[in-house]
Each structure stands twice: as structure tokens, then as C-alpha cells.
Amino acid sequence: MLSTHPRTADRIAQAIDLADNNGAASDSGNTRRGVGRYLKQIDGMVFGDGVEQGLVRGTRFIHPDMRFEFEVPEGFTIHNKPDMVLAVDDKNNSIKFAEAAAKDVRAAGGMEKFLTRKWSDDATLKNVEWVDINGLKAVTGAASVWTGKRKVDVRRIIIEQDRKHYWRFQFVTDKKDTARLNEAFRRTTYSFHILSRSQAMAVQPWRVRVVTVGQGVTFDDLVGSMAVPEYQKEWFEALNGIGPDDPLIPGSRVKVIK
């Protein structure tokens, strides 16, 4: 068996030998094969979410394809998941945003019945009312819910963008935080608005950009040019294999996020 399936240690050694041979210096002395072609291919590649998934920009969530935007309160971190947008704070209060299928809204008998019956079969909503959110019809209601671990206050809102697109906000707060977050959550609700075509087209994803290191440019200069708001240094190091103590050669090319 070992003749056709060598030990792991032997396979690792063989892989290293093959890598060394394939990376042997060319006539030009360049040990990195096809670097120019590789950099040309990745220059402009989308980094992170594309416009079809929606984009997180600090406390804003922008969906250029669906042409809407909203903003969550300071202290909440947005996670763009496949089936929802989730924003949470350090006390486990949360905002969930997701689509409501138009066929489900129609099958329920309209927005109010969808909100109070189909969506809220786990709670009896109180103070159900229709509201106007930047010219869009919406209906909302609130309830107190026992999660099995704690009592929380829940507010749910369904918004009609058009007859084909409906969106849901769910705000969940610990009882002791409800009053404190009430105004902030109202601002989030009323921050939801439709983007014009020109506004939507102006929103672009982050992209990998290949730049040439100029004379006198430092590691910190390049890190500071990264568009990502967090872990700029770590992303730059991971993309380039360059640390703060490594020499930067003028004329060499590096990858940044713009």
C-alpha cells in the first residue's frame, strides 16, 4: 500500500521537492513564475461582498442591486449573511433584516395579516399600526416574548418597496435596554430608503488593486491606503506576505484594497 500511498511525511517532502523544481530560477533570475500575468488577472478583482449581495459600509447597509439603504445605531456590528442582515451589540440586542416573499404576503391576505399571523405565530403583537417610511407603506407591531432563557421585547415591521418586494425588520432588546434603544431603533427604521439609479450605480464594492511602490513610500503609507475599516495591517500582510520590518523596494508591485 505504501508504494502507491506513501507516508504523510514522505508526501510532504516530495511536494517540497516538486515546488522547489517548479520554482527554479528562469534565465531572467526571477524565481516567481508568471507574476506579471497573475497580478494583471487579479487587479480589479472584487474583495468581499459584491453589489448583488449588498455592501456593509460601517453602520450602513447598502444594496445597489435592490436599490435600498439603511443605517443601524452606533455600537452595532453588521453581519451580511446569505439569508439576512444581522446587526448586534455587545449586550446581545439585535436587528434582523430580511426579505418577505411577495407570494407569502399575498397568500396571508396582505401585509398586516402576514405580520400578525404568518410571521408572528410565536407572539401576539400589540399596538399594530400602519406607518409611512419615506413614502413606503409599512405596518408594525410589538410584543414581549420568552425565549426560553430571558424575556425580550420584540418589534417587527414589514415594508413594501413595490408589489414584488417586501422587507422585514425585527428589533429584539433585553427588557432593561428597550427604553434606551427605542429612539435609535426608530432612526434605523426611518433610515430605510430607496436609492435612485444614479445613487445605486455610484456604489461600488471594494476591489484588489495592484499598485507600484513609489520612492519613499512606507509600509504604514500602504496600510493606511487600505479601504477596509478593520484589520488593515493584517489584510495587507496577508495579501502581500510583507511585514512592517520587510524592505519595500521602489518599483515593486503590491496589492491593496480600494
Image (cartoon, rainbow, N blue to C red):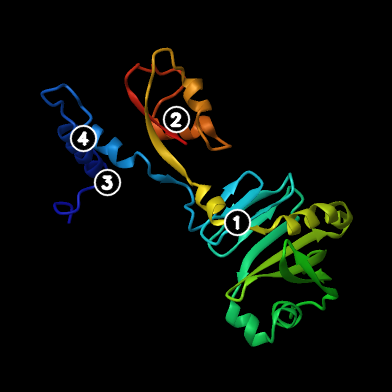
Q: Amino acid at mark 2?
A: Glu
Q: Mark 4 vs mark 1: which is more N-terminal?
A: 4
Q: Mark 1 vs mark 2: which is more N-terminal?
A: 1
x and y percentages locating residue 89 in the rendered image: 73, 49
Q: Amino acid at mark 4?
A: Gly
Q: Amino acid at mark 3?
A: Thr
Q: Amino acid at mark 1?
A: Leu
Which residue is more in the foreground, 159 or 78?
159
Q: Which residue is mark 4?
A: 34
Q: Mark 2 vs mark 4: which is more N-terminal?
A: 4
Q: Which residue is mark 3?
A: 8
For the residue carrying disc 2, how many other residues have a C-alpha within 10 Å: few (<14), some (14-19), or many (20+)?
A: some
Tags 3 and 2 touching, CB below 8 Å: no
Q: Which residue is mark 2?
A: 237
Which residue: 15% across, 29% down? 24
Tell us which disc is closer to us: 3 or 2.
2
x and y percentages locating residue 258 in the rendered image: 47, 36
Which residue: 74% across, 81% down? 121
For the residue carrying disc 3, how many other residues have a C-alpha within 10 Å: few (<14), some (14-19), or many (20+)?
A: few
Q: Is residue 11 above or below residue 160?
A: above
Marks 3 and 2, Cα distance to the nearest angstrom? 30 Å
Q: Mark 3 vs mark 2: which is more N-terminal?
A: 3
Task: Give SS at disc 3.
Answer: helix
Q: Is residue 33 above or below residue 204?
A: above
Q: Which residue is mark 1?
A: 195
Q: Is residue 107 above or below residue 213?
A: below
Tell us which disc is closer to us: 3 or 1.
1
Q: Mark 3 vs mark 1: which is more N-terminal?
A: 3
The reply, left or right, for residue 36 in relation to residue 143 is left
Name the outermost residue toward the left.
27
x and y percentages locating residue 255 in the rendered image: 39, 32
